[in-house]
Image (cartoon, grey):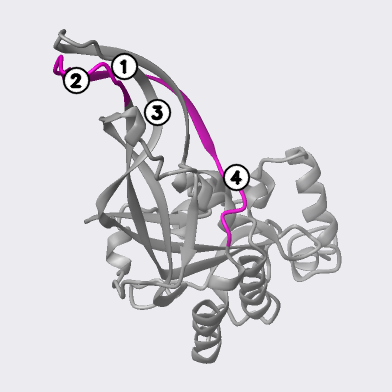
Amino acid sequence: MKKIQLSIPFSVPLTKEKNWNSIDNTKTKFFVARFHFSINIRQASRNTSVGEIQSVIQSQIGASTSRITSVELETEEINHEESFHSSIVSNEFITEILNNISSEIGQKDIFKIGSESKLNITNKFKFEFIDSFKLTKIVRNKKTEKLEIKYSIDGATDEKFVAASVYKRIAWDVSLSHIDYLIVKYEKKYFGLRRKRKHQPNYENGKPQNIIRINLPICCIKFWERLDSSILIKEKDYIQEVDDSGEIEITEPEKQSKSYIEQFKKTPSLYQIAFAAFPLKWKNRKGDWTEEELIAIEFDDAINSAWWFKHGPGRK
């Protein structure tokens, strides 16, 4: 059984400040949360199903045929990982969860999710996710393939044969492993002028405190996958069993698979990503402003502060 891990949003876009949520009017406090999904990929059935016709072959009485035919197919396949990511990011249910987390740790300066809130999040995923989630943003990749069809037909018939695509049904058993979140804010020390980056929640005893462990199967996603092989059938016996190769079915979880945070070792932490997105000093941020403008804002904010009277123009 193949396993994949998806952390949404992806790490690379989060290295840009614009992809974090600003949670105050001064643009000095930012928030982001990620959902970490563990997906077990398996065959939904041992049986294969017949799809569309690739080629038609005419046999001749008295002439045995054994040959290889090349067929060029233009296909449009669904990128299921990208489709899942795009649909999760735009899902209203996910947005509601994010807003709840942001409200609890951002506005109240708690910086930690309590056990009651964790239970509420888990129950919402358990009882509401399946009814709200659809693959609403399907990402398709077009490609041209050249297939070689090998066949042998004896000379006892002059019937037509068709070479048809073969599909198998694939199932994704999707579990929500955990959610992580982080506040990044720029603040000044009591006698300081310059704002510097600070993360919340901090590490405690060498361990991150920004993880909500869920470990909950949330859905099963089934779709068709075309095999590289073809099947040769008499034209009169041909029945197309896969009418829509892009059909996607989302159901209740079928497998109670476990997922562990350790499976996401290759995923950068939000602490690591924040170092790339936010420079240590507020004045060095990248955006639609100059360093001089940011320094001026810092200086204006410092008027009548402790720094103003101890180190600045207010000093006597």
Distance between the alpha carbons at the discs numbered 3 and 1: 11 Å
Front tag of 2 and 1 = 1
Q: Which residue is mark 4?
A: 16
Looking at the image, residue 233 sits to the left or right of residue 111; the answer is left
Distance between the alpha carbons at the discs numbered 2 and 3: 15 Å
N-term mark: 4 or 1: 4
Q: Is residue 114 magenta?
A: no
User: What amino acid does circle 1 point to?
Assistant: Ile
Distance between the alpha carbons at the discs numbered 3 and 4: 47 Å
Distance between the alpha carbons at the discs numbered 4 and 1: 56 Å
- In the image, the segment drawn in magenta is 134-162
Q: Is residue 140 magenta?
A: yes
Secondary structure of the residue carrying numbered label 1: strand
Q: Which residue is mark 2?
A: 151
Q: Position of residue 143 (x, y in %)?
A: 45, 24
Q: Position of residue 16 (x, y in %)?
A: 60, 45
Q: Which mark is residue 53?
A: 3
Q: Which residue is mark 1?
A: 57
Q: Are marks 2 and 3 in contact (CB under 8 Å)?
A: no
Q: Are marks 2 and 1 in contact (CB under 8 Å)?
A: yes
Q: Position of residue 138 (x, y in %)?
A: 57, 45
User: What amino acid does circle 4 point to?
Assistant: Lys
Front tag of 3 and 4 = 3
User: What amino acid does circle 2 point to?
Assistant: Tyr
